Amino acid sequence: EKGGFDTYMLKEIYEQPQALTNTLIGRLHDDTGEVNLDINLNPQSFKRISIIACGTAYYAGLVGEYLIEQLARVPVEVDVASEYRYRNPLVSENTLAIVVSQSGETIDTLEALREAKKGGAKTLGVINAKGSSMTRELDDTLYIHAGPEIGVASTKAYTSMVSAFVMLALWLGRARGTLSEMEAKDLLHAARELPRLVEEALAPERVEQIRRVAEKYAHARDYLFLGRGVNAPTAYEGALKLKEISYIHAEAYAAGEMKHGPIALIDAQLPVVVVATESRLLEKTISNVQEVRARSGKVILLLSDGDSENARHADDVLYVPRAHEMVSPVVNAVAMQLLAYFTATALGKDVDKPRNLAKSVTVE
Ligand code: M6R
């Protein structure tokens, strides 16, 4: 049932091209730049959006915040559900609350959803599990159709959730007139490319390179992950994956925050993974990389294919296929998952059953 793979996690990592196809299929209209999400809510009626989730789903929500604010110009806030439910949140009929959950059963997210409804918010779910508890209480559900995810560490659900947010941002941006037809078509084409790009990200020589790097640093005590903009959450997700399955202590920051504290941690023993794929802000990220180098940190750079120029700033490079910046978190996440995976297996850990963790957290 693991389809020839050693673990569910690895199987699910390799299922991502298909999972993404299933997330996107039938929803993208190339000729018009429109998406069809079968959502009955009126996209023009919201003044603000609250995204609520836990763990990896929360990081998908952070990407969603970036995409929606950039493309639809609606104010978005993102909360971890366990905070939202107890903070007496400001909600009105003009609020759209979006809950994000693979299982649809996470108790904090479910209770946060109830809290948002109590305040009069309209509610939308980005959910994987059909007919799960949340879907029975939501006004509308955007299923991600990633298929069953068994590995405790979420992989394909994350990339499918992020892709769902690309479509939501398109939907909102078009309906609210903030996104031109040309921009929408451009993004839509970029989204359509995702299954192929992720397939390419899983090419054997790339996977081998990630394995080599993972093994080289598998005995590190700590890891630091940095990223900016739409890829800051890629760094957070990379650190969470590594912690969950390899038990290596990992921290993640928006790259520009490093000099406000975490830079004190850097020494020659610290591997620092920096998401430095093509972006408007790449130069800024590279100057952060130089700060790490100046303190002898070991730099592992995630670079877009062909960027040999920036490779000279790295101890090790992981190349990923080039993607439109707004969809790049999907492609970049795959490298993060594999880095965590091969670190954990190099250390002999049971990645499908990491200690102290459950697949679905249904108790507080
Ligand atoms: O089922 P959910 O998406 O609501 O689960 C949320 C988190 O518990 C989950 O993402 C958790 O952080 C994973 N173990 C991450 O790999």
Image (cartoon, rainbow, N blue to C red):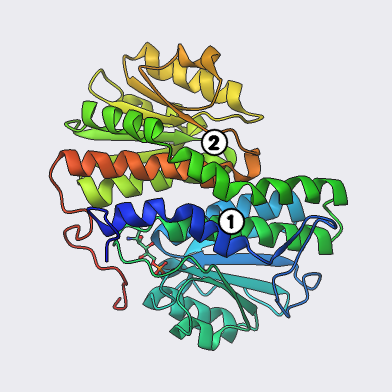
Q: Picture quarter containing residue 111?
A: bottom left
Q: Label for residue 163?
A: 1
Name the residue located 18 percent from the left edge and 62 percent from the top edge.
356
Instruction: Report x, y in % for residue 191.
Output: 65, 50
* Residue visible at 43% across and 41% down in the picture: 202
Q: Nearer the viewer, mark 2 or mark 1?
A: 1
Residue 230 as seen in the image, left or right of residue 70: left
Q: Which residue is mark 2?
A: 228
When asked about the image quadrant of residue 326, the answer is: top right
Choose between 154 and 286: the one closer to the eye.
Answer: 154
Count residues near mark 1 (Cα–Cα under 10 Å), then give few for <14, some for 14-19, many for 20+: many
The span from disc 2 to disc 1 (Cα, nearest Å) is 19 Å
Q: Amino acid at mark 2?
A: Arg
The residue sitting at 44% across, 30% down in the picture is: 274
Q: Position of residue 262 (x, y in %)?
A: 36, 31
> Where 174 falls versus 101 (above or below)?
above
Evaluate whether residue 68 shows in this view: yes
Location of the C terminus by quadrant is: bottom left
Q: Position of residue 192 (x, y in %)?
A: 66, 51
Q: Residues within 10 Å of mark 2 (few under 14, many from 20)?
A: many
Q: Is residue 77 visible?
A: no
x and y, in percent, of residue 164 in the image: 60, 61
Identified by mark 1, the residue type is Ser
Residue extending farthest to the front is: 4
Locate the N terminus and report the quarter of the image it occupies: bottom left
Q: Which secondary structure, mark 2? A: loop
